[in-house]
Amino acid sequence: MQTNWLNKGRVAAPNDDDFFLPELCLPEALLVLVLLAELLVLVLVLAEPMQAGFNWVRLALTSLFAQWIVLLSAALLCRLRPWLAGLPAWLAGIYCSAVVVGLTVACTAVADYYQLGGPLQRDGEVNLYLRHGLIGLIMSTLLLRYFYLQSQWRRQQQAELRARLESLQARIRPHFLFNSLNSIASLVTIDPFKAEQAVLDLSDLFRASLAKPGNLVSWSDEMELSKRYLSIEQYRLGERLQLDWQVDSVPADLPIPQLTLQPLLENALIYGIQPRIEGGLVTIEAEYTDGLFRLCVSSPYDAAVEAPPSRGTHQALANIDARLAALFGPSASLSVERRDGRHFTCLRYACARPTQEARAI
C-alpha cells in the first residue's frame, strides 16, 4: 500500500478519508507548497525584462510576499478542511479557490498600504490587484485539480487492492474448510464420537473465521483460530502431534492477515507429522522487534519419507505470499526451507500497532 503526504493524518469528519484536499498542515505538505511558491516567484521574475543590475531586494520581497500567501492559505484551508470535506467536490474546490484569491488580494492590499514593495503608481493599482488575483486563481485551480486527480487515482488503487485481497480470501476459506473436512472424514470410521466432536469444533472454527470482516485481525484472534484447527487435528493424530508455542513476546493486538497461521500449521502437519509413524514436534516461533514481525513454523523432515501430494497447501501458501505483498509491500516475505532435519515455513513483515491497517484498506 502506498503512503504519502497526501493521505497522512486523520480528522474527525466522517468522510474525511475520501476528501481530495490533503492535510496541508503536515510538514511534508508545507515543504512542497513553499517550494512551489518559490518556483512561481522565480518564473515571474524571469518573465520580466532582464536589467543590467538585478534587484535582489525585490526578489526577496516578492518571495516573502508569496510565502505569506501560501502559508496563510494552507493554515486557513487546514482549519476549514473538516467542514469542506462534507461538501461536494466541485463546491469545495470553489471555496478553496475563493480563499486563496481572497488572501492574495488581502496581502496585496497590506503590502500596498505599507508600501512594502515600494510606492505604487495610482493608475496601476487596480491592474496590480487584478493581476495578483488572477495568478492566485490560476495557481490554486491547477493545484486543486492535481489534488483531485491524485485522490481519484489513490481511491482506484485502494479499490483494486481490496478486490484482489477479497479474491485471495475467498480462495483460502474454502480450501481451509475442505482440508478440515478431510481430517474429520478420516475420523468417522476410527472414532465416530471424536468425529462428532470435531464437526462441532469445525462449526465454531469456521464461524470464527467469518466473524470479522476485513483482511487483518489481531494476533490473539488468529492464534485462537489456529488452536481450534489444531484441536481437530489432535483428534486424528493423537499423541503423534506435539506442539511447542514460543510466542510470548508477540503483542496480542499485532495485525496479521486472517487465516495466515492455520495454513502454515497445516503445511507442517502434512509434510512433517502425517507421513511419520511416530509423528513429531511442531514448533511455532514468533517475535515482534523494532516494528518487524517474524513468524516461523517448523516440523520434522525426512527425505526418505514422502508426504502425500497436496495442491491445496501450495495454493494456500501462494495466497499468503500474495496477501503479504499486497498489505505490507515488497519488503514482506514468505520463505520455505529445509535444514537440520526440519522443514521451516517463515514469514516476516514490518507493521505498526495496533491493527489500524485493517481500517485503512
Image: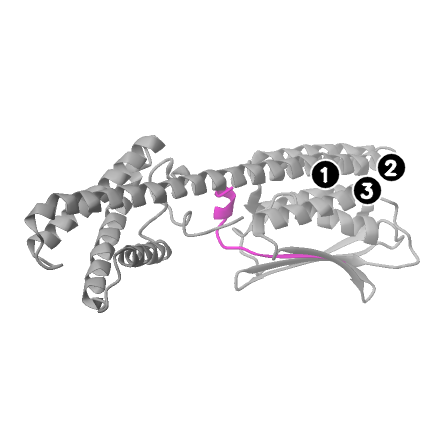
Label 2 vs 1, first from the N-terminus: 1
- Most extreme residue toward the right is 304
Q: Nearer the viewer, mark 2 or mark 1?
A: 1
Nearer the observer, 174 or 152: 152
Query: What is the image's colouring?
Result: one colour
**SS class, disc 3:** helix
Q: Is residue 289 left or right of residue 96?
A: right
- Most extreme residue toward the bottom is 53
Find residue 240 and report its horizontal and vertical position in percent. Answer: 82, 52
Find residue 74 and report its horizontal and vertical position in percent. Answer: 27, 49
| Residue drawn at (88%, 46%) of the image | 308
Residue 247 visible in the picture: no
What's the CA distance linking mark 2 and mark 1? 22 Å
The residue labelled by disc 1 is 176
Residue interval drawn in magenta: 344-361
| Residue drawn at (81%, 42%) of the image | 311
The residue labelled by disc 3 is 311
Which amino acid type is marked by label 1?
A: Phe
What's the CA distance linking mark 3 and mark 1? 12 Å
* Label 2–label 1 contact, CB within 8 A: no
